[in-house]
């Protein structure tokens, strides 16, 4: 789905992401773990074309994300849910419908897809409610519905369950699994939660100070991590 080649992102003189090579495979749930400040959100922003790498190439299904034109049509093949859910000052329905409307879908098709998405996240009853009045868990579920309603090829999730109670966490994890299995959507999930990574991800990428220090199938990473920092993080010994 993505191939990174000699990618570097710096702010001022500091390299916050430095990845010589890395791939994200189609159809999998990829977990990205790492301490705070290790560059996880920056990496997602690079993949989602919100930011450009300072150097190197990111190839998305054969297209170079930096040089390709038009950018919008590529960006529309992906969807991202941000660390802090961003919803518009509008109803739940309008928030979920937005991506479909800008893609020019007919009104009746928009309605059908939005209601189906709201049903999937269990929020049909809140369709008319202003998004700003939602609870944290509801807002995060609306953000996820808005992301997958457009049927993206890849879903980028930045800590979608931080600050949620166990019931909402379970619901969102089930949703992610369902989207991946039933729609074959590739998922790239940033999470601090090692248990969540183990439950959901097929493949783990562990970042430390902007670098990928571990990259492999989930069970292998958890049972025999190759890097001491990964081991410390998995065992909860890393202070961050
Ligand atoms: N726009 C920016 N300007 C300057 N520095 C930035 C910018 N965005 C991120 N950084 C820095 O880059 C580093 C990586 O940030 P990033 O948000 O990617 O970390 P993270 O791994 O997502 O952390 P967290 O787990 O806390 O969300 C941090 O040190 C951050 O301060
Ligand atoms: Mg982050």
Image (cartoon, rainbow, N blue to C red):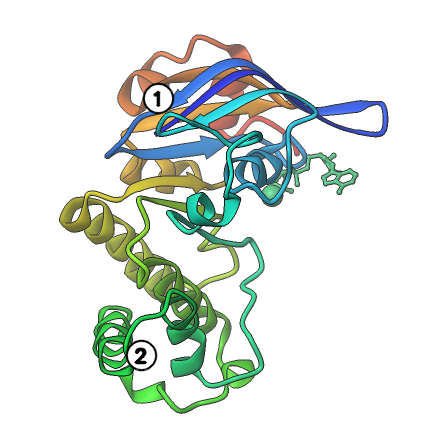
Location of the N terminus by quadrant is top left
Label 2 close to label 1 by CB (< 8 Å): no
Horizontal arrangement in the rendering, residue 17 relative to residue 133 (left or right): right
Q: Is mark 1 within 8 Å of ligand 1?
A: no
> Regarding mark 2 in the picture, which secondary structure is present there?
loop
| Residue designated by label 2 | 123
Q: Quadrant of ligand 2?
A: top right
Q: CA distance from mark 2 to mark 1?
A: 35 Å
Above or below residue 40? Residue 179 is below
Above or below residue 128? Residue 155 is above
Where residue 222 is drawn, which disc sits there?
A: 1
User: Which residue is at the front of the view, 96 or 213?
Assistant: 96
> Would you call the spot at circle 2 few (<14 residues within 10 Å), some (14-19), or many (20 or more)?
some
Please tell me in which quadrant of the rendered image residue 194 appears: top left
Give residue 106's position: percent from left, percent from top. 28, 77
Above or below residue 18? Residue 112 is below
> Would you call the spot at circle 1 few (<14 residues within 10 Å), some (14-19), or many (20 or more)?
some
Determine the residue positioned at 64% across, 28% down.
53
Please tell me in which quadrant of the rendered image residue 49 appears: top right
Above or below residue 9? Residue 196 is below
Determine the residue positioned at 23% across, 52% down.
179
User: Which residue is at the front of the view, 28 or 112?
Assistant: 112
């Amino acid at each position: 789905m993505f191939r990174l080649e000699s990618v570097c992102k710096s702010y001022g003189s500091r390299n916050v992401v430095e990845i010589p090579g890395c791939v994200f495979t189609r159809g999998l749930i990829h977990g990205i773990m790492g301490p705070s400040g290790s560059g996880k959100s920056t990496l997602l922003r690079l993949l989602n074309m919100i930011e450009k790498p300072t150097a190197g190439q990111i190839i998305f299904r054969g297209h170079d994300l930096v040089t390709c034109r038009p950018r919008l049509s590529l960006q529309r093949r992906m969807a991202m849910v941000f660390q802090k859910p961003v919803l518009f000052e509008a109803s739940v329905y309008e928030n979920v419908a937005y991506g479909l409307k800008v893609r020019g879908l007919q009104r009746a098709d928009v309605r059908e897809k939005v209601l189906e998405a709201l049903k999937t996240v269990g929020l049909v009853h809140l369709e008319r409610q202003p998004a700003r009045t939602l609870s944290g868990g509801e807002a995060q579920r609306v953000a996820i519905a808005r992301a997958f309603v457009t049927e993206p090829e890849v879903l980028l999730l930045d800590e979608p369950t931080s600050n949620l109670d166990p019931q909402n966490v379970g619901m969102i994890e089930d949703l992610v699994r369902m989207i991946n299995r039933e729609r074959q959507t590739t998922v790239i999930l940033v999470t601090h939660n090692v248990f969540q990574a183990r439950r959901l991800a097929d493949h783990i990428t562990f970042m430390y100070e902007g670098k990928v220090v571990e990259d492999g199938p989930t069970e292998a990473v958890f049972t025999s991590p190759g890097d001491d920092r990964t081991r410390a993080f998995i065992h909860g010994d890393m202070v961050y």
